[in-house]
Image (tube, rainbow, N blue to C red):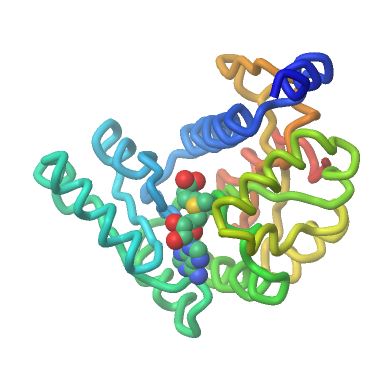
Amino acid sequence: MLLEGWALLLSRSPSLAQALEYRHKLIDAAVARHDLDVLVEIPGGFSRRAVTWVADHGVRAVEIDLPHVIAAKSARIAAAGLEEQLGGRHSLVAANALGDGFADELKQLIGEARRPVVVVEGLLVYFPPADRDRFLASVASALQGTDGLVLADVYTSARRNRRAFGAKLLKFGIRLATRGQGWQSSWPDDAAVEASWRQAGFTQLGTVAAGDFPDLALPFDESRAPGVVLNASCSRTDGGVVADVATSSQVSS
Ligand SMILES: C[S@@+](CC[C@H](N)C(=O)[O-])C[C@H]1O[C@@H](n2cnc3c(N)ncnc32)[C@H](O)[C@@H]1O
């Protein structure tokens, strides 16, 4: 452990906790700069983001996850006495993101919103590539005709090999969380990330970087984070999203 600490300090690599916290904060900052009318988290897990957005900003929010997680989260919200404060603006939806009708289900949940933000945090690595690509196509299809945005953490083997230490820690954490099933998919490189998202139907792609947010102080070298946060949309070119993407870096690792 001591050696690991020194290695992290010397390389300015993030610890696993730092990498996860940074990813979460970076996505939070990116959500905040989009003038959203609904926040959708796939999966919601035990993230507080959706509840915070409803309570602090009055924005409608939807959290999608598997039934047992939705049941547990619903119980936690009830135990915290938050139901009344959230009113009808917060929904917990039990659904399989890989299910056949998921695109239609998601479209219905987005409803009339014009500027939805869909956060896909901590999910894609668990899906084998074919499932992952089908899921991305469902999300793109549900966002058609809106000025919506997807924010997702993505990983490439190329980056993992270059920044081996932080990525190994994340991989180890995922293996623990999935009881040995481990990291199912990452793309080989940036070109493969771009091809896969475009094939799914996304037309605008960029990455979100800490440098875009002066308040986001990082205790490590950002280039050593194990993954990047992708900013993707399939919006019309006259919408505001394109401006968001244009301020971000290109897809790169
Ligand atoms: C690592 S957690 C991430 C949760 C949250 N986004 C966060 O960052 O804290 C992964 C979540 O994915 C959910 N999940 C896995 N497969 C899913 C599927 N096919 N459909 C919906 N949710 C799924 C799990 O139930 C779990 O809550």
- Relative placement, left or right, of 118 versus 189 is left
Q: Going 75% across and 34% down the picture, which residue do you hit?
A: 166
Q: Name above or below for residue 198 compared with residue 63.
A: below
Residue 4, by quadrant, is top right
- Quarter holding the N terminus? top right
Residue 225: image x %, image y %? 73, 33
- Quarter holding the C terminus? top right
- Relative placement, left or right, of 7 versus 219 is right
Work out whether residue 118 can be spotted: no
Residue 110, by quadrant, is bottom left
Work out whether residue 232 can be spotted: yes
Q: Going 58% across and 32% down the picture, which residue do you hit?
A: 26
Residue 208: image x %, image y %? 67, 36
Q: Nearer the viewer, residue 90 or 142?
A: 90
Q: Going 42% across and 70% down the picture, which residue do you hit?
A: 107
- Relative placement, left or right, of 215 versus 188 is left
